[in-house]
Amino acid sequence: MFELNLIKDKAKARQRRRVIFLAVVTVLFLGGLLAIFVGSLFWKESTDLNSLNETIARQQKQVDDLTTRLNTEEPAAIKRKLGMIAAYTEDFNTLKRRPYFTPILQDLYQQRPNAEFWYNRLTIDVNTAGLQRGASGTPEDPSQRANALMGPRSLQANGYIQIVASDIVTENDLKQVAQAMDGMLTLLGEPQFSLDLQRETSPTADREVSRYVPFQMRAALRDSSAVNN
Amino acid sequence: MAEKKSQGISSDWTAGIMAIVAAVLFGGGLPIGLYMGLYIPKKQEREAAQAKLKEVENQMNAQVDRQKRVNDLTQDAAKIEEWVRELETPFTDPAQLRLVQENLRTLCNTHNLRVPQDRLQSETNPEVVKATGERIPFKDGLQATQLVIHVTGTYHDFARFFVKLESMSDAVVIPEALIMLGDQSQGRKHVFLLSVFVVEKRDYATIGR
């Protein structure tokens, strides 16, 4: 009886160990499966990351190359376009002023007082008052001469006019002539006539009949923007 | 005896349960450890890399837009260059300045404008149109070369010459200064000294460069 129980206990103990062993093995097996699953996820992440890093490196290189190229090309393109716009504007402004002196010469030819008169000397010149020169005598700004060329002019003319009537009539006559010289307005402004009555000469003994009086005509724009715009 | 037996059974189960618990801890801990210690950091790295990739793609898109802008700027500049070329049609090619000088000389001759007498006496080979060699730059790159016209003739002839000079189709001539001296012998042959600048075509390739 005692031996039989002992045999039964041994059998139960073997069964218990089997159960425990199976449970342990099952748990470890499931744990291993899970670990393999997690490992595969890790592996996938690793390969994805490597691939991403390669893509990033490749794209970053493209971005860097493009940025370096554009850092040079963009300012150059902007400068080129602005240069072209400036060139176009300068050409347009140069051409729109044509003709320059023709209206002045036409005025000088067409507008005349009601008396005999002669021009002795006539000078049309650029306004050189604004030119700034450096120590060497050359203009500080190389384009100063061109600016003056495109700017207003000054005119000075000397001559004689034969006065047969009174000085006042002749002066009024010259004033009307000056006002009619509208071709000069853009480049020179309205001319001003002045008579030098002190230096008058008379061809005859009777000064009341006829006198030759020196006159001067001057014109110069005070506001150069009238031309430059 | 029975007490001893029951003690043996319970200690067997205890060891077994401990082994199972240890197996659970080890079997569960390993994947959890791998998950937390390897997978999660790697996943975070991958997410950071994806964010970085997106950032790089945005940078790339910005640069592509910039490239498009540069292309537009280049096209605009090319279009304006065409306009400038068209506008500069009457301007003189720097290599053709001698031709303009020759044309002006012909123009003077056809308008009866001649070399003044005093110059004929003092100079060996006087010319009505002389190039001084002075070349002035404009603010935005235009260049002009000076010519001096020194002639004698009637005012009427000179005025007609001047109208032609300022309306030439193959050259743009800007008069700088003019001195007219009346005939000293009270005749009609006045002396005209005119300084003009002939505007030159630009070197289009160097504009804005």
Image (spheres, coloured by chain):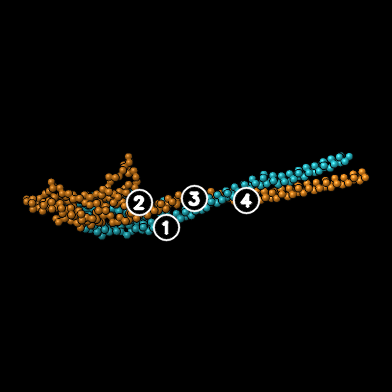
Distance from Cα at disc 2 to Cα at disc 1: 22 Å
Asked whether A200 or B24 is in front, the reply is B24
Kind of residue at disc 2? Gln
Looking at this rendering, what residue extends furthest in the front direction? B2
According to the picture, the residue beneath numbered tag 4 turns out to be A51
Q: Colour of chain A?
A: orange
Q: Is residue B74 left or right of residue B193?
A: right
Crowding at label 3, few (<14), some or many (≥20) Cα neighbours within 10 Å? some
Q: Colour of chain B?
A: cyan
Secondary element at tag 2: strand
Kind of residue at disc 1? Lys
According to the picture, the residue beneath numbered tag 2 turns out to be B143
According to the picture, the residue beneath numbered tag 1 turns out to be B79
Crowding at label 1, few (<14), some or many (≥20) Cα neighbours within 10 Å? some
Labels 4, 1: front one: 4
Secondary element at tag 4: helix
Kind of residue at disc 3? Leu
Asked whether B127 or A103 is in front, the reply is A103
